[in-house]
Image: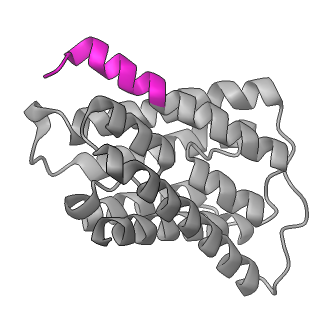
Amino acid sequence: MKKCLVEFIGTFFLVFTVGMAVRGHADLAPLAIGASLMVMIFAGGHVSGGHFNPAVTLAVFIRGKCDAKDVVPYWIAQFAAGLVAALIVTFLFGGKPAGGPALHGTVPSAIVEFLFTFALAWVVLNVATHKSTAGNSFYGLAIGTTVMTGAIAVGGISGGAFNPAVGLGVFTMGLESAKQLGLYLGADLAGGLVAALTYKAVHGAD
């Protein structure tokens, strides 16, 4: 229960930051989003692993560093946090959803969502689960910076979710379409899956 609560809190503040920064047209939105993830990982990583992302949970599970019994509860906590954060953001903006969902090309979106979710999960696995980086003090910064980099580089192509829980949040806020939500679920989980398989191919059982 404690681990799921930490996953809820971290995912909530990530999605809340996404919503407030994007709907508020913040100039430094990618920096705020990456920093939010970074500090929540530093705050909760020692309790739950600081996934805050169903695709990361999948990757860490396949890598062998997340118990099977935790996967579904983590996903429930993460998606619930994304939904609650989206509802609060909508309330703060007068109870009105965003003016309309963004328009993104399906194939370009799928490509960049897959690639940067792969990058995110790859970074997580290498800086937060490998024995040679155990106890390091930079893992949160590395992970948060990966998300910031992706948001800047390809946010205009796909919306830059790299996280199915964020995808649910931005859909609920009216920022993205149902089609895009489906893409976030498929491409992002695939990115996490392939990152874990690649990690195992490179590092073996380590």
Where residue 174 sits, quadrant-wise, is bottom right
Q: Residue at x 61, y 47 (%)?
A: 161
Residue extending furthest toward the right: 100
Foreground of the two, 179 or 100: 179
Let me know if residue 204 is in the magenta part. Answer: yes
Residue 124 seen anywhere in this rendered image of the structure: yes
Residue 33 vs 1, above or below: the answer is above
Q: Position of residue 1 (x, y in %)?
A: 32, 71
Residue 2 vs 111, above or below: the answer is below
Residue 146 seen anywhere in this rendered image of the structure: no
Residue extending furthest toward the top: 201
Quadrant containing the C terminus in the rendered view: top left
Q: Residue at x 66, y 52 (%)?
A: 167
Q: Position of residue 168 (x, y in %)?
A: 67, 56
Position of 123 compared to 184: left or right?
A: left
- So how many labels did they put on this image? 0
Q: How is the image coloured?
A: one colour
Let me know if residue 149 is in the magenta part. Answer: no
Where residue 93 sits, quadrant-wise, is bottom right
Q: Residue at x 23, y 42 (%)?
A: 128
Position of 182 compared to 205: left or right?
A: right
Position of 136 compared to 129: left or right?
A: left
Q: Residue at x 74, y 26 (%)?
A: 108
Foreground of the two, 170 or 196: 196
Residue 30 vs 190, above or below: the answer is below
Q: Position of residue 114 (x, y in %)?
A: 58, 28
Position of 104 compared to 115: left or right?
A: right
Q: Position of residue 67 (x, y in %)?
A: 28, 45
The magenta region covers 193-206
Q: Main secondary structure of the magenta part?
A: helix
Residue 105 vs 74, above or below: the answer is above
